[in-house]
Amino acid sequence: MINNRGYTLLELIVVISIIALLIAGGVATYSQLMKQSRDGRRKADLENIRGALEMYRSNNGSYPAALSLLTGSPKYLQSVPADPRSPTYTYYYTGSSSDYTLGAYLESSTAGGCGVSCTGATCNYCVGPYGQ
């Protein structure tokens, strides 16, 4: 009678391959979820800045030339938010007395650019006083 107490090399290779495939799928999913999370934060940051810009315009009759004016006195923002992947990516702002554009680069978006240049990439998500 033969007594088998171990695993064959083929069985070990199959098990290790299955584990490797599961780990690879988990890493890819985690990476995508992190990108979506950062993109959600970017959108929320731009909406917060947009709200502060509208309050500034309501009080002053025009939009500020720079976002740093929103943190002065009176404060419309505690601080100007930074991109979650700063300094690789930054938020874009340009404003005149009657219009502005806020832009960000979304990592998980395949949308075309919105015509402004963010640091490191072309912005593919922009908002203004009239929406996206």
Image (spheres, rainbow, N blue to C red):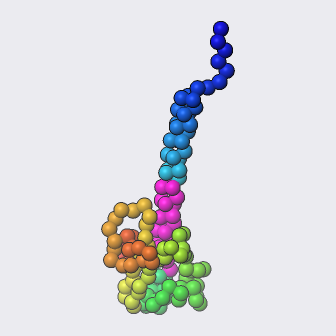
Q: Position of residue 105 (x, y in %)?
A: 43, 70
Visible residue check, residue 129 = no
Would you say residue 42 sits in the magenta stretch? yes
Left or right: 30, with 7 as reference point = left
In percent of width and height, residue 130 lies at 35, 76
Residue 115, percent across and down?
Answer: 33, 77
Where 39 falls versus 116 (above or below)?
Answer: above
* Whether residue 19 is situated above or below residue 41 in the rendered picture: above
Residue depicted at x 46% and y 68%: 43
Quarter of the rendering containing residue 103: bottom left
What residue is shown at x 39% (from left), y 70% (from top)? 125
* Prevailing secondary structure class for the magenta stretch in the rendered image: helix
Quadrant of the rendering where the N terminus is positioned? top right
Find residue 132 and report its horizontal and vertical position in percent: 36, 71
Quadrant housing residue 4: top right
* Region in magenta: 31-52
